[in-house]
Amino acid sequence: MKLSWDYFNLVIVHSTGVYSHRVSWCQCPGAEKDRHLHLLKVRLFPASITRPQSAFTFDVLDNFLIDALECKTSAMSFYQKLRCFTDNAFPHKIPDRYRELMRVSRIWRDLMNRIQFGFGHETDRSPGPGDLALYSPACPQPGINLPSSWKDSYDDWLVMQRYVVDGNFTAQHMKMKTPEDDVSLADGKRYMVTEGPYETHITESVEEKEKSSCSNHRAVNAANVQRSNLRATGVGATACARHGCFVPHAVVDFQKGERQMNMDYSICNALKYPSEDIGSALIIYDVACQWSIHFHARVDQSYHLSLPRLIKILPAISKFHLSAHKLLCFARFSLNFITGAGHIDGEILETLWAPFNKISPTARSMTLSHRKEVLDDHMRDSNWKKLVGIGKSPLLPKFKSLLKKYYQALQGVNNTQGPYEELTNSLDPADVQTWKKKAELAALDRGELLDIYQLKMDKAPTMAEIRLRLTENELSTNGRTGAVAWLIEGINIENAQDALRSSIRQQSEDPTASQRIIIEEKRQKLLSRINKFHETAMVITNGMELEGGEGLQQDDPELCLEEADGYNFPGIEDPGEDSILDLGDDADSSAEVAELWMPSWEASDVIMDDIIMPLRQEELELRKGQANDCLEKLRQALGDRSMVFREKLHSNKSVHHQGTRSTKELRKITLAINKHAREYRQSRAAMQRLGADSDTLTLYQSLKVEDLAVSKEVTEENKHGQGSDRLAWFWRINSAVNSQQSECMYEFYRVNWLKAKARYDRWSEELKLVQHEMCWTVWWFQNQKSKWQARADESIKNGHRAYAEKQAFMWAEFAAEGTKSFQGKWSITS
């Protein structure tokens, strides 16, 4: 070998440090003339082609890409690490190759992607939109993991596309100073859309500045927000709703907020990804009620948007966000009432943003093309990890995920089938058939027909309305007037007693003299009202001596924790011999715990004469109105608490600026909730003592503390039973009680039967879906194995053949593991 004596310095960057070597190029006959090819043959990637002065080992480039994916390491931090490895005492003496690393790593990433997707072998063609992207193997894809006869073998709902759409406002991008210098290596080839056509679409689209007609949704109302220093205010993506894989060529940039023109482009691109002749698509979007209104019209008016022929769009709202919508949206956009939805919550894309956001600050100031490549790489890595994972289990995490869903679906079917069949057998068969036909029709035509899942009843009568009715009939009933007003005053005194007890509990352990004076003055005023009330009672009952029974309702400590400081709990202690609740002499009793002489407070063995019986009936009616008022206030307060908890305490802006204020607001609402809950319990206890019948007590059920909590099905997405109807009973019925009791019960059973059927149907669909996804996953792996085996057979060069056979072996192993794991569980349709 002939050596040139023309030595020169070459800086080599390796995973262990940065080194400078004197090298000479080979001058042997037949040697490569291009110097960069010499470096590539010894696994060194040159920083330039013509006169390379620096080179990076393949090993350090692989390390940098893995560090960026796993640790979210920036290029600057990575190179600083190499400097410290080389000379930790004088790192500034190490040659600076940071810019070269930025450029070379981009080229290396692009080359690796093209090789991994077969374009190193198929050099006669260039990658098209999304061709360098990985997608979910478990989703139905015609021509890839579905049999040729799939149209005849599968139900339409089984192969329906299921996508979730969402925006991320953390992934911002600053304006570039010299955008003309930007060079793209794979524009539109992976997950981010092609820039040119997308910019044209945005420029030519007409912006519709519309306010939300539903709730105050940030995604709609903040669409006009813009920051002058940002080129992009965030990104919008479409992902598989069942497995959380980003859809290739369907991620877009926001120019000023999450506008419909942005999301339309993402959704249309996603619907065209391997979906030949699939006739329906489920689109889960937080503001689907607004987005879906004019979607087809916007597509028809745009030259850049298109949909697969005859596709049917089913809009839905994710379960957590649905609670913030108007009541009308619940039935029309709930995943619980969509045939083929299975058991998904629609929130899986939210979980994908968490790791994605860690790289957003680094990508914020990159060039447009570099940022796209980095985001694309992280989305590919996210999809890859969902496919193979990084654990040590002999089974793939994808398989473990499907197996977990399989066992959950089995349990879900078992838990819902029994209650559904028992309820069906207990109802009138004619009614069941009528409801079933309406449910089937609603599933086909949707829209207003889905309102069958809502109660169709008049609003429950308030206490004021019942008081008016009783007052009008008062004279004809018992020949006396003033009894209704007297009973109302007794109920109001009970509420005043509860308010006073609450005030005492909110006092500090050592109240000031002024605070104690305020409490004593309230006690005196309340005691004066009680004495006057008892004087009126003597008149109403013709001087009958009334004795207290079990009237005092103990306050539940769990409904008082927000107001007590752990010192004073009047109305909570267990009564003993020396307790303040020992009311042998009412004059010596504290006003806040004194018993009242009311019909519902009478001992059960009192003689019921012609005076007491009408009073008991009147109080029973008033107690029903009181319960209706309490439940309505409870529903409103719980809705307010959910809104504060979601929009303020959990919003990005509130973390640093509104935390204390929002916490105080939440506490204020919680105090109101506890107050209404205590009042309802008081009214129901009174109904029981007044002899309410079983139908009344069925409508006015016992109120438990857990009924006031936020449903776990929207806060724990992996929790078993997340799609079941876990709303408290007072959400499911309107507590309406009027002369037509049968109508109330009919509505109660109709809605509960429809929801029981929907729960059972969704779990049955989930089981069938998972069984088919097992099969589709294995077929997808086999398809990949066949592609790489064909490339190996067609390869001429040994290196190409070896790489292709390695890839074919990997996919064959995946398929074999899947077959072994799913044996006896999957559903094979050929």
Image (tube, rainbow, N blue to C red):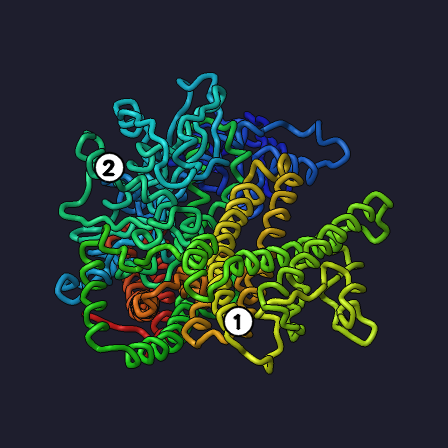
Where does the image place residue 14, in percent across and percent down from the top left?
59, 40
* In front of the other: 114 or 743: 743
Identify the residue at horizontal 42%, vertical 19% (top origin): 179
Classed neighbour count for the residue bearing mark 1: other residues with Cα under 10 Å, few (<14), some (14–19), many (≥20): some
Q: Nearer the viewer, residue 818 or 270?
A: 270
Q: Is residue 617 above or below residue 384?
A: below
Quadrant of residue 494 in the image?
bottom right
- Residue 429 image position (x, y, % from top left): 22, 77
Number of callouts: 2
Label 2 neighbourhood size at 10 Å, few (<14), some (14-19), many (20+)?
few
Answer left or right for 188 relative to 627.
left
In percent of width and height, residue 349 lies at 43, 49
Q: Is residue 733 left or right of residue 127?
A: right
Q: Position of residue 496 (x, y in %)?
A: 65, 54
Which type of secondary structure does the marked residue at label 1 adopt?
A: loop
**Up-down relation of residue 657 to residue 751 (above or below):** above
Residue 381 appears in view: no
Residue 814 appears in which quarter of the rendering? Answer: bottom left
Find disc 2 in the rendering and name its residue.
294
Quadrant where the image shows the C terminus: bottom left
**Distance of label 2 from label 1 (alpha carbons):** 65 Å
- Given residues 443 and 808, the one toward you in this image is 443
The answer to which of marks 2 and 1 sits earlier in the sequence is 2
The residue depicted at 73 percent of the width and 56 percent of the height is 527
Q: Which mark is residue 611?
A: 1
Q: Amino acid at mark 2?
A: His
Residue 495: which quarter of the image? bottom right
Visible residue check, residue 670: yes
For the residue pair 172 and 722, the one nearer the viewer reads as 722
**For the residue marked with disc 1, what is the amino acid?**
Ile
